Amino acid sequence: MIGHEWAIEYLHRSLVGGRDAHAYLFVGPPGVGKARLALRFAQALNCEHLEQAPCLKCRTCTRIEHGNYADLRIASMATQAASLKPDEAARQKELKIDTVREWQRDIALKPYEGRRRVFILHDAELLSEGASNALLKTLEEPPAYATLILVANRPTMLPTIVSRCQVLRLRPLPRQTIVRALIGQFDVHEPQARLLAAWSSGSIGWALRAAACPDEVQQRQERLDQLVQLQQQPHSIGFRWAEERSKEYRSGQQQDVLEWLELWQNWWRDVLLISADCPESVTYVDRRAELEQAAQQYNVAQVYAVMQRISEATRQIRENVNPQLALENILLHLPR
């Protein structure tokens, strides 16, 4: 684990004191370490060396790490997609009730070889209404030997589900923590480590992927170039860009389109930070000159208005508003 020492200490104390809950909700932005924390907790609950759990070396810890432990059950959008045809998998937007029921099916069985049965459900914010109701029944009366761990990017599930879980909110990691990890544990050169840490927005998962795959950084740079140029180009070019993103969204690349909007939002946030004389918090540290130029061209009210429209478009797209119309609305109101 990198960072989140407070969460690790909290879970450790609850285990040592015998106060561990029957259900947990680990919530936080993508890539901050929620899935890793859930797996480590599952190891701690069943580790063969109680005094140093999880030891990460015993047979139980090793099998849990590789996902082939009899008393660990994991479900997610990915496991749901594995049972679908490729075109159906691309269109899925929520965790269905059948997925939850399959995940719950053997919850009544007592532990086969460990001390506790652990059930991890990723993408919990995408639970359908039927799946949420099915899960709620289990949370209300869980077996004494079972631990349920829900993992979500946002705590948008039913309030009754959240209220029945011990909630741990994992925050984005400090920039310097990611820099130290990249340099000390993954041998990334310092200039590149500082750039990736700034671009990661606190997501150690993204920083590690980008360090291993430079093409991802290059793709983001090219996308940001397109977004910055939209202010200077005719509306026809912007509308063509919106149409392309809409087609991607309908073809199953929803997350890709949302990442475009996140890039754009971060750009305008950086412009606002430069205007407010807070350059140390800028995300795109390699584009300082461009940001300073934009901060001189647009006033704070204009920048804030664009950020609001991008946030609103993101919310609307998540709620199934026509993505092309939502994107075109941003383009029509860009300051020029």
Image: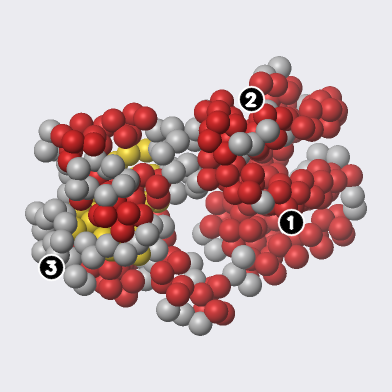
- Residue at 20% x, 43% y is 49
Q: Amino acid at mark 3?
A: Leu
- Name the residue carrying label 1: 328
Seen from the viewer's position, the closer of residues 239 and 117 is: 117
Upstream in sequence: badge 3 or badge 2 = 3
Q: Give the label on residue 109, or none.
A: 3
Comparing labels 1 and 2, the label whose residue is closer to the camera: 2
**Disc 3 element:** loop
Q: Amino acid at mark 1?
A: Glu
Q: Give the label on residue 281, or none.
A: 2
How would you rate the neighbour count of disc 3 (Cα within 10 Å): few for under 14, some for 14-19, many for 20 or more?
A: few
Find residue 298 and report its image quarter.
top right
In this rendering, the answer to whether 264 lies above or below 67 is above
Relative to 191, 103 lies left or right: left
**Disc 1 element:** helix
How would you rate the neighbour count of disc 1 (Cα within 10 Å): few for under 14, some for 14-19, many for 20 or more?
A: some
